[in-house]
Amino acid sequence: MGVDTRAADRSAGPVLAGRFRGDIEGLRGLALALVLVGHAGVAALPAAFVAVDVFFVISGFLITGLLVDEIRRTGRVRIVDFYVRRAKRLLPAASVVLVASLLLTYLFLPPIRWSETARDALASAAYAMNWRLVEQSTDYLRSEEAPSILQHYWSLAVEEQFYLVWPLLLLAVARYVTRRTSARTGTRRPLPRSRPGRHRRPFLGDRTAPWLLAAFAVVGVPSLAWSIHLSQSEPARAYLVTTTRMWELALGGALAILSGHLTRLPRSAAITLGWAGMATVALAAMLIRPETAAYPGHLALLPTLGAVAIIAAGPSAGRHGPALLLNRRPTRAVGAVSYSWYLWHWPLLVVAEARWGPLGTTAGLAMILCSAVPAVLTYHLVENPFRYARISRARVLRMGLVATGMTVIAGIGLHLAVRPPPSPGPAELAGAVPGAPPGDGRTGAPVDRFARITPDPLGARDDLPDVYRDDCVTQAQDASLRSCTYGDRDSAVEVAVAGDSHAAHWVPALQAIATERGWRLVTYIKTTCSFLKAPITVAGRSDPSCTEWNSRLRRALTGERRPRLLIVSSVTQIPLVDGSTPPPGSATADAQTVALSETWSEVTAAGLPLVVIRDTPSFTVDMAECVSAHRERLTACAQPRERALAWGVPQERAAAAVPDARLADLNAVICPTERCPAVIGGLLVYRDAHHLTATYARSLAPQLHERLRQLVSPRLP
């Protein structure tokens, strides 16, 4: 696909067209090094992720340079040839690592991860991984799962989605300039074909630059504005979506359009500009704080403009500029294998952490170095042979289909390899021991195996309270007051339960009680939002939706129609606006105790009886994943009780400080020994690192009802 164009002006193509830039190869190596040390956990570079922005600028510069050079030399953009080149460059190595990652998942990762990894592989093969991660990041129930072995494919997806649009836009500009020039000169004679091995003289001159830059403005300016806005309102989504990153690739493209002017920079100015760019990228990596930064947004201007300065300064600065470091054999060598190394490093890190637990910085760096071995092999045996092979379009298409097909088949195979058994019926559940201590009942010690575990850990993620299926949960950024009613809907005995997901995981037990005792149970649940007056932070930023939701909820609860009883529970790692979450333990910040006390005092002062269910254990280990990996050695999943319950101290102190608040603590049942078991009486206790499975929570209904009866009798039947 192409378009013939003509113009009166004569101009040399981009100065750098057809000439290798060693400093850019070295810049790719530097950017990769930032990515690698960041993923290894080097604390001195908390924002090493800015290297991705540098990669985007480099990609935009190089790819746009090729496109613009083709437009200026030939008057056309051969779209099909462009995508054939992209396929030869990217698909072979990407497909090899995708299939290898699926094999590594099967061999080394817990079965609970297999199905999701298979879906990740399909998304990666379709260059849509960033949108899959967006979906997961906005799904609270999935947001705390272990990172995908393929999550690094998100940046490749962003690039390829951009290049679905960018060449077509430049092609449209070329066609417009041709028609405009032809209309002005009155010439419509078609261009002669070039002879093989020879170039025509350039015929689209400097007059094209303003129009090509207009293409940058059309893409870049709205994308940057959207990036700034979305980074403030939805930071997790903003980091991954293509629309907030397009301006970075377009910025590199704008530099390529102006590349003919790069040699006009005075040498001293170019040297200063280049080193300033290096300093800007380094400072961005060291000073941007991911826990509080609204990224990419305007902060991404630091690494991107830094990269632009480095690239722009190169031709004039020479060896006295950043090329002094970048155009060296070691940095160029890293840059050459950067694509394959980027593909390989993350899967090996994920596998290592799954096998040996969290890696320290030293171990992380060691795994990074190990990943260089398959990277170099892939570069020499896969990437380069396909990249430089003389292959017809049709053959490239067939190869692309085969490569993608291999990934799809491997992904489907992995997905089919894991099939959780059907959920047990009531009769089978009756054989379990609801709420009973683990082991033989005498010592209460965790045991290594049960004949059957319910729910099966492979289906634990979906063993959820009904409030999620019934769309009764207020999501992030939403302040609306959603509620659902369970039990006897016509009962005069109304019991309300309010809080975050740790209140939600008690709903199955409360439903069972409400049905048996004839209560009307009303739920008020909001994601990542405790029942609390004080403003809280989410991802390092204040969450006004939580504050507004709490205000509306307190008005509803203390209005004319009040429930007979209010039950609250929440995760106790509450990051307040006034300070970050402190370490757990008896010395937990007084601010959290005060905030809880003030909220509960307001409710009880209005005459509303209050029961606080003390928070359940919280671990650093995903218990469902651990059980799926250690079915025959469940004691490997048992975690220290004291550490797991340390976060609940503020609740205990606040309940003691509010005279009319009552504390219901069921942790003597949930974790009865010094090490908390993952399975009790054949029931899987946790669906992740801190949420109870609905099945296990339901088994606690007798104990919870007895405790409520003791605390608030005779208010409840």
Image (cartoon, rainbow, N blue to C red):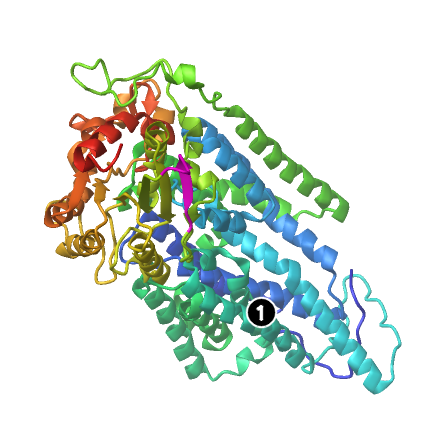
Q: Main secondary structure of the magenta part?
A: loop
- In percent of width and height, residue 113 lies at 44, 33
Q: Quadrant of the N terminus?
A: bottom right
Question: Which span of residues is magenta-colored?
Answer: 482-491
User: Which residue appears farthest toward the bottom when viewing the image?
Assistant: 184
- Foreground of the two, 459 or 520: 520
Residue at position x 42%, y 34% from top?
461
Above or below 492: residue 442: above
| Quadrant of the rendered image containing residue 411 | top right
Question: How far across and down, in percent of the image, does residue 250 sit?
Answer: 56, 68
Query: Which quadrant of the structure image shows residue 661?
Result: top left
Quadrant housing residue 398: top right
User: Which residue does the image show at 57% across and 45% down from the upper left?
Assistant: 383
Magenta region includes residue 512: no
Does 295 appear above or below 211? above
* Residue placed under numbered mark 1 in the picture: 253
- SS at mark 1? helix
At 38% from the left and 67% from the top, the residue drawn is: 281
Using the image, determine if residue 495 lies above or below residue 24: above
Query: Going 18% across and 19% down the picture, which residue do you hit?
Result: 444
- Name the side, left or right, on which 190 lies relative to 434: right
- Lateral position of residue 581 relative to residue 342, left or right: left
Q: Is residue 572 above or below residue 591?
A: above
Asked if one can make out residue 328 in the rendered structure from this viewpoint, the answer is: no
Along the viewing direction, whichever of 279 and 491 lies nearer the viewer: 491
| Image quarter (top left, top right, bottom left or bottom right) of the C terminus | top left
Q: What is the count of numbered marks?
A: 1
Q: From where the camera sits, is residue 158 visible?
A: yes
